[in-house]
Amino acid sequence: MTPGGLLLRVVLMLSLLLNGLNAAFNSGCGS
């Protein structure tokens, strides 16, 4: 795999994790 592809996968995984954490935090503390 190319370094660029690996970096892209890492960024995508991190963004998915952040989205999940943000959604859980909003549903837990928002309402």
Image: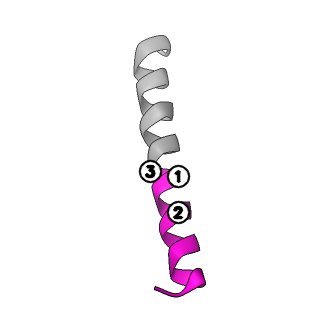
Asked if residue 16 is positioned above or below residue 2 in the image, the reply reads above
Give the spatial CA distance, label 1 vs label 2. Answer: 6 Å
Q: Dot 3 lies on which element? A: helix
| Residue 3 appears left or right of 16 | right
Magenta stretch holds residue 17: no
Amino acid marked by disc 2: Val
Evaluate whether residue 1 shows in this view. Answer: yes
Asked if residue 26 is positioned above or below residue 14 in the image, the reply reads above
Q: Is the residue under label 3 in contact with that under label 1 (CB below 8 Å)? A: yes
Q: Is the residue under label 2 in contact with that under label 1 (CB below 8 Å)? A: yes
Instruction: Name the residue carrying label 1.
Output: 14
Highlighted magenta segment, given as a residue range: 1-15
Amino acid marked by disc 3: Leu
- Foreground residue among 14 and 27: 14
Residue 2's disc is none
Q: How is the image coloured?
A: one colour
Q: Residue at coordinates 44% horizontally, 50% vertically from top-left?
A: 16
- Pinpoint residue 28: horizontal percent, then vertical percent: 42, 14
- Foreground residue among 23 and 1: 1
Instruction: Name the residue carrying label 2.
Output: 10
Amino acid marked by disc 1: Leu
Magenta stretch secondary structure, dominant: helix
Asked if residue 29 is positioned above or below residue 3 in the image, the reply reads above
Q: Dot 2 lies on which element? A: helix
Instruction: Name the residue carrying label 3.
Output: 16
